[in-house]
Amino acid sequence: MDLVIGPLDLSAHVDEALAVQAVAFGLGSDEVAVRRQIVLRHMTYPGARALGATEGGRLVGFVYGMPNDRGHWWSTVVEPYLRAQDLDGWLDDSFVITELHVHPHHQNRGVGRALITRITDSATEPRSILSAIDIESPARGLYHSLGYQDLARRVLFPSAPRPYAVMGAPLPLRRR
């Protein structure tokens, strides 16, 4: 079957997207319920947009993001870590990748790369930021290959069991 990447009405397909995230990220039903409310709220923010990857009409991956706002919860958590590195300017005029998830059966096929490059290609901001679990992983390898650099490491989010790395890249993203 052919993979199709295109705009995704994430509010209308939130449960389908979170099912992908739950499998990819190992989330339980309680965490999915919390994230559902977060996603729906995020999609009301100015400039928020999403892309989906479908195969045979079934969602197998998605990405969403928005122009960063220092008043958003994520920014308030990461700002002290970035300021400690004198890098808090990255929070201004940046497009934040809020979530990027690909079903495990479709990973390592270029789906994540296609999703993140397509969504950032349409950004008007000169750079992109994101956070990822602070371990060497295929996701962080993908981000590094696209030009993302570590801006802060060992970032602790309330209720997250593991530390995160905040990463940033100039736009457009580097291509292979």
Image (cartoon, rainbow, N blue to C red):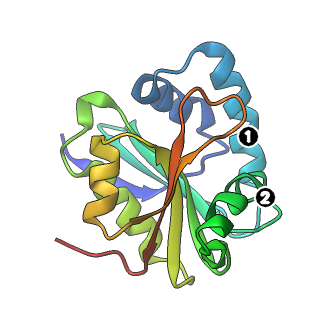
Query: Number of labelled discs?
Result: 2
Residue in the picture at 67% in, 33% down: 35
- Residue 104 location in percent, x, y? 30, 29
Q: Quadrant of the N terminus?
A: top left
Is 162 placed left or right of 58 in the picture?
right
Name the residue furthest top: 29
Relative to 135, say whether 77 is above or below.
below
Relative to 128, say whether 19 is above or below.
above
Write down the residue under mark 1. Answer: 38
Report which quarter residue 158 is drawn in: top right
Residue in the picture at 46% in, 66% down: 119
- Disc 2 marks which amino acid? His
- Residue 141 location in percent, x, y? 27, 52
Name the residue furthest front: 84
Disc 1 vs disc 2: Cβ atoms closer than 8 Å? no
Write down the residue under mark 2. Answer: 72
Secondary structure type for disc 1: helix
- Disc 1 marks which amino acid? Ile
Kindly report the distance in space between the C-alpha atoms of the residues bearing marks 1 and 2: 12 Å
Is 55 placed left or right of 65 in the picture?
left
- Residue 55 location in percent, x, y? 29, 40
Mark 1 neighbour class, 10 Å CA radius: few under 14, some 14 to 19, many 20 or more: few
Q: Mark 1 or 2 closer to N-term? A: 1
Q: Is residue 142 visible?
A: yes
